[in-house]
Image (spheres, rainbow, N blue to C red):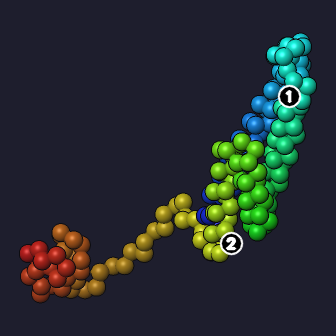
Amino acid sequence: MQENYEARTARSYALVGFIFYILGAVSSFLGSAFFMGGFMGPGMMGGFVPSFFPFFPSIFLIISLVLAVWSWVTLNNIDAGRYQDAQTASLVLGILGIFFAWLIGGIFFLLAYGRLGYAIRHPHATLKPSVPTEAAVVPPATGTRFCPECGSAVSESDRFCRNCGKTL
């Protein structure tokens, strides 16, 4: 059985969104460590940091990790053929990604949402075979010849091709 083309495209979009959510988690971790003083001692801004400010990167780190794990589950749903579950998750992941400033990941999950909808509505939209199929070679009937210009079959008595008008 061939794979659904739209589902494969949706999986590619979801994979790119997942990668951007992982990158968001890494950058949130680095920001959290930087502002909380994990790498630089007392923090980037020293004593000028308001008391609530260092918690923002930690909150974004938690949100990034949740989005990354949920993205992984969505990829597994696509692989398992559970397109309806993956479509719902893709919509939520796209909206949350855009809302929490992971714009590129959010856009890719919204694209995956659209492709999964098409895969659900058209389950038989399969990929084209990667190996070209061989055309059946049919020997010409007796008294049949072919036009040298267009290759159409012409009879022995024809002086002109009926398809392109070339003189035979």
Query: Residue 78 appears at what percent x and percent y?
Result: 75, 60
Looking at the figure, which quarter contains the N terminus?
A: bottom right
Q: Residue at 81% of width from left, 45% of height from top? A: 68
Please name the residue that numbered disc 2 is placed on: 120
Task: Point out residue 119 in the picture as x, y percentages from the top left corner.
Answer: 65, 69
Judged left or right of residue 23, residue 161 is left
Q: Is residue 20 placed above or below 83 in the rendered structure?
A: above
The residue that appears at 63% across and 57% down in the rendered structure is 111
Viewport quadrant of the C terminus = bottom left
User: Where 75 falls versus 36 (above or below)?
Assistant: below
Nearer the viewer's eye, disc 1 or disc 2? 1
| Mark number, residue 166 | none
Q: Which x, y percent locates residue 76?
A: 80, 56
Given residues 13 and 113, the one toward you in this image is 113
Q: Residues within 10 Å of mark 2 (few under 14, many from 20)?
A: some
Residue 63 location, quadrant: top right
* Residue that label 1 marks: 53
Three-letter residue code for mark 2: Ile
Number of residues whose C-alpha sits closer than 10 Å to that of mark 1, classed few (under 14), some (14–19) or many (20 or more): few
Q: Going 83% across and 38% down the picture, which residue do you hit?
A: 60
The amino acid type of the residue labelled 1 equals Phe
Q: Is residue 43 visible?
A: yes
Question: Which element type, helix, strand or loop, lies under badge 2?
Answer: helix
Residue at the image point whose x is 54% and y is 65% from the top: 128
Q: Nearer the viewer, residue 152 or 38?
A: 38
**Relative vertical location of residue 149 with respect to residue 159 in this rendering, above or below:** above
How many numbered discs sit on the rendered protein? 2
Q: Secondary structure at mark 1?
A: loop
Left-right relation of 129 to 44? left
Q: Quadrant of residue 148?
A: bottom left
